[in-house]
Image (cartoon, helix red, strand yellow):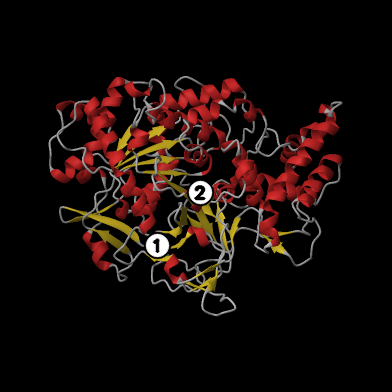
């Protein structure tokens, strides 16, 4: 396909138009819907003094496998006015929300809601309860993967200061002779193609195996077009295809569906944002300096200072140089571009590529073992077109999602941080790969003017429940004095402040059992946001050390953690199958997470939190009961 004036596909975030025209169009066409639902919710709790005008709500759903997906679906069901019974709780807040961001398992809930059109997401799940008895990657059962990431030398190791870092990733050489510990090896092989385990052999093994092989053949058939077009592929391409089958039951009818093609003239859902982390395999970066990327239906790129550019998502995959197409057509008047690269399965899989770690590790084991189960797995890799003994010098990174060619190649960026201009390929990891498992970053962009964030945390920190670690890491990112990136600040009464509020320590979070009820973060601007000392600000030699936003108030955060209100919801991130009772129990519990255990007091306090920033801007007084709410739910 040929496109004229191709340069227009780039959006320079340093121009006056801070948001893309597509995003502005989407938001503008949802505005009447969002504002009417906000006012309706506020009227329900007797707040109707004009504070509901022009409020922007964002939703942030954390990662955590199926645990996060089912919890997230329960939360969205509580927010959806179409869910029976929600009208007396929090129904309408989904329709009132402008943005929704997801990571990994939380993104699965976001995409299930977004891609299933006008259908109630709860109905979508209820129609396919039996499908969750079958693993996403057929043949891979539940397995003990404790310590897997550390064994891969990829993430969750510790620096000298004790902070988690993204370590230098060891490239996988296909002819290497990897040594695996016997316990983990045994666990993985028992999980992978369990039907072939001698102790579990059944008479219908051949039938089951044929069905499994057919499943993987279907995946590789769907990815074949990308391979034949000579694009770089990784396990993410296959993982995404398997995953999307669970999210969109009829996906096989739309296997070529792209994220950019979901743009609609009359948007009925919040603007969806998919988060991922870009990594240089030869560079160690912790969460303070990690490169956070986002996909949305219009663009792909990053708001962080190292880039501040986005590319039109529809033409991702086009060879670019310094923001211009690098390949001309035969007439030399128009430029050659690519469409279809932004497949929904690929985008969804990219934000949850942690699960490729399993497949990657199995691949390493194959090089040292010889047994019937490993021969079966070898066959699967051959179906994928991956040989165990390719060219001796070939080194790849199958654990990453690859965007190649890099659309930002040769782009001159004056911002602070590691440059991408010389990278031929972008390596993207799981959206929570830097330890920030809640997608706050896209909702803290000042240009988006978000007033309140509903954050749902299903992270596995302690016994598969959150302990506030993800909150702390995001806080440290925005409150760091040693970041490789420019740090955004806002101005309040002639004082510069960090844009992320103070948060409880992990110890305090656990000792006070803070996961058991919602928490409001950032209630009082003067008290809850750290100041930047004038000496620190003045002594900075680089003007890029800080980015200041004088007319911006950061959003109040309504933080809710996965807690066993009505169901023991601390399922393993790597739990591959769920029976019907488990799915229903997890979703119902997610509903209770959203409503604070169906507390009428909390529901009224949510209304106070929604209008808090509006009252701060307009200096309006809130109802007396709001003061009691803040006293109970605000973190001090």
Residue 162 x, y percent position in the rendering? 48, 49
User: Which quadrant would residue 50 be assigned to in this image?
Assistant: top left
- Give SS at disc 1: loop
Residue 191 x, y percent position in the rendering? 73, 35
The residue tagged 1 is 485
Is 510 rendered above or below residue 501? above
* Quadrant that contains the C terminus: top left
- 109 or 25: nearer the eye? 25
Is 256 rendered above or below residue 141? below
* Quadrant that contains the N terminus: bottom right
* Position of residue 557 in the picture relative to residue 51 (left or right): right
Is 298 rendered above or below residue 63? below
Label drawn at residue 164: none
The residue tagged 2 is 431
- 528 or 127: nearer the eye? 127
- 267 or 347: nearer the eye? 267
Residue 497 x, y percent position in the rendering? 25, 53
Residue density around tag 2, few if under 14, some if 14–19, many if 20 or more, within 10 Å: many
Q: Spatial distance from mark 2 to mark 1, Cα to Cα?
A: 18 Å
* Position of residue 270 in the picture relative to residue 114 (left or right): left
Instruction: Examine the rendering and report whether any part of residue 418 can be seen.
Output: yes
Instruction: Examine the rendering and report whether any part of residue 513 can be seen.
Output: no
Residue located at (76% from left, 58% from top): 174
| Residues under numbered marks 2 and 1 in contact, where contact means CB atoms less than 8 Å apart | no
- 62 or 18: nearer the eye? 18
- Give SS at disc 2: loop
Residue 149 x, y percent position in the rendering? 61, 46
Residue located at (26% from left, 30% from top): 40
Residue density around tag 1, few if under 14, some if 14–19, many if 20 or more, within 10 Å: many
* Position of residue 110 in the picture relative to residue 606 (left or right): right
């Amino acid at each position: 396909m040929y496109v004229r004036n191709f340069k227009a596909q780039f959006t320079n975030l340093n121009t006056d138009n801070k948001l893309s025209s597509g995003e502005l169009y989407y938001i503008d066409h949802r505005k009447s819907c969002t504002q009417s639902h906000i006012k309706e919710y506020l009227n329900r709790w007797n707040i109707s003094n004009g504070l509901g005008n022009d409020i922007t709500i964002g939703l942030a759903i954390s990662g955590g496998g199926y645990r996060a997906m089912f919890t997230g679906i329960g939360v969205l069901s509580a927010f959806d006015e179409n869910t029976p019974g929600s009208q007396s709780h929090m129904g309408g807040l989904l329709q009132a929300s402008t943005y929704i961001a997801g990571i990994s398992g939380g993104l699965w809930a976001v995409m299930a809601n977004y891609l299933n059109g006008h259908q109630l997401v709860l109905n979508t799940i209820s129609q396919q309860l039996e499908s969750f008895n079958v693993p996403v990657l057929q043949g891979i059962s539940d397995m003990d993967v404790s310590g897997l990431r550390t064994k891969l030398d990829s993430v969750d190791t510790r620096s000298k200061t004790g902070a988690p870092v993204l370590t230098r990733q060891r490239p996988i050489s296909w002819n290497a002779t990897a040594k695996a510990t016997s316990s983990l090896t045994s666990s993985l092989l028992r999980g992978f193609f369990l039907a072939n385990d001698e102790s579990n052999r059944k008479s219908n093994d051949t039938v089951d195996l044929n069905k499994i092989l057919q499943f993987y053949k279907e995946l590789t058939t769907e990815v074949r077009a990308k391979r034949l077009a000579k694009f770089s592929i990784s396990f993410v391409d296959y993982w995404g295809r398997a995953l999307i089958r669970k999210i969109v039951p009829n996906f096989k009818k739309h296997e070529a569906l792209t994220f950019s093609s979901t743009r609609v003239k009359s948007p009925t859902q919040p603007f969806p944002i998919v988060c991922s982390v870009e990594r240089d395999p030869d560079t160690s970066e912790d969460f303070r300096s990690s490169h956070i990327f986002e996909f949305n239906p219009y663009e792909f790129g990053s708001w962080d200072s190292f880039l501040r550019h986005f590319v039109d998502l529809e033409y991702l995959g086009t060879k670019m140089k310094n923001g211009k197409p690098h390949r001309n057509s035969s007439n030399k008047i128009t430029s050659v571009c690519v469409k279809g690269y932004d497949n929904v399965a690929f985008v969804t899989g990219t934000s949850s590529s942690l699960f490729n770690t399993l497949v990657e590790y199995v691949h390493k084991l194959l090089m040292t073992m010889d047994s019937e189960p490993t021969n079966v797995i070898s066959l699967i890799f051959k179906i994928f077109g991956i040989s165990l003994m390719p060219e001796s010098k070939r080194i790849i990174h199958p654990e990453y999602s690859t965007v190649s060619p890099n659309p930002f190649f040769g782009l001159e960026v004056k911002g602070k941080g590691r440059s991408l201009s010389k990278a031929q390929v972008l390596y993207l990891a799981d959206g929570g790969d830097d330890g920030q498992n809640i997608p706050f970053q896209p909702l803290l962009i000042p240009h988006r003017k978000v007033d309140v964030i509903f954050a749902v945390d299903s992270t596995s920190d302690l016994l598969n429940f959150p302990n506030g670690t993800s909150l702390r890491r995001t806080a440290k990112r925005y409150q760091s004095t040693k970041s490789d990136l420019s740090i955004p600040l806002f101005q309040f009464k002639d004082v510069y402040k960090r844009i992320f509020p103070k948060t409880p320590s992990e110890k305090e979070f656990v000792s006070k059992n803070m996961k058991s009820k919602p928490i409001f973060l950032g209630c009082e601007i003067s008290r809850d946001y750290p100041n930047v000392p004038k000496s620190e600000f003045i002594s900075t030699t680089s003007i890029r050390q800080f980015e200041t936003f004088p007319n911006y108030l950061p959003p109040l955060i309504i933080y809710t953690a996965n807690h066993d209100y009505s169901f023991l919801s601390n399922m393993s991130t790597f739990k591959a199958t769920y029976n019907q009772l488990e799915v229903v129990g997890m979703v119902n519990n997610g509903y209770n997470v959203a409503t604070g255990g169906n507390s009428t007091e909390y529901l009224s306090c949510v209304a106070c939190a929604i209008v808090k920033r509006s009252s701060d801007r307009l200096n309006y007084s809130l109802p007396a009961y709001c003061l009691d709410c803040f006293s109970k739910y605000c973190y001090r």
